[in-house]
Amino acid sequence: MFGVTGTGFAVLLAFVIFLSFSSYDRAHEKASVEAVAISQLFRTANLFPPDGQRQLHGELICYARAVIHDEWRTMRDERESSLVDGWLARIERTVDRTQLHGDKQRLAFDHWFDQSAERREGRRGRLAEAEPLVPRLVWLALFLGGGLIIVYMCFYADPGSRHSFRR
């Protein structure tokens, strides 16, 4: 009885640990994609006219700070940050208002949208991994299984075996 219960509990626990680590790896990967995309957007903004460049630099910095200080906290509640959404809207308005002069700035503008798509995909993946991976029923089974194993060991252990460890 103990072997079957213990094995079932160990398999379930290993499954939960494996899923948790794979979810963490995916979230880490997506957060890295988003961070690299923001860094590239910052560099691409250098190719825009000076007014738009300064404004975009400031807005990208504020976006990154909002992700770090606000959205990571709101992800615990399985929701997006309205502050981050606000900075994204401001960045898009600034890009839309930017007057382009020359082929170099037009090329930068096209490149901006590719990098924005990468940032969007990274954020989407990071937010998707914020949802609970392990269902409550599995947590209940883990706690119940662990409790049953402990109860079994306490009440059904051989009372004579504890004397064999004395010297």
Image: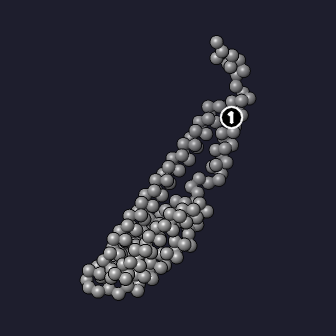
Tell me the quadrant of the picture where the N terminus can be found. top right
Residue 3 seen anywhere in this rendered image of the structure = yes
Query: Where residue 55 appears, x then y in whole percent?
Result: 41, 79
Task: Say what secondary structure mark 1 lies in.
Answer: helix
Question: Which residue appears at 56% of the width and 73% of the height?
Answer: 82
Residue 115 seen anywhere in this rendered image of the structure = no
Q: Quadrant of residue 59?
A: bottom left
Amino acid at the residue labelled 1: Ile
Query: Where residue 103 appears, x then y in whole percent?
Result: 25, 83
Question: Which residue appears at 37% of the width and 83% of the height?
Answer: 51
Tell me the quadrant of the picture where the C terminus can be found. top right
Question: Which residue appears at 71% of the width and 29% of the height?
Answer: 154
Query: Where residue 109 appears, x then y in whole percent?
Result: 33, 79
Query: In the displayed structure, would residue 18 be above or below residue 69?
Result: above
Query: Is 85 positioned to the left or the right of 102 in the image?
Result: right
Q: Quadrant of residue 42?
A: bottom left
Query: In the displayed structure, would residue 100 be above or below residue 152?
Result: below
Query: Is 161 positioned to the left or the right of 23 in the image?
Result: right
Local crowd size for mark 1, using a 10 Å CA cut-off: few (<14), some (14–19), many (≥20): few
Q: Quadrant of residue 79?
A: bottom right
Q: How is the image coloured?
A: one colour
Question: Which residue appears at 34% of the width and 81% of the height?
Answer: 50
Residue holding disc 1? 150
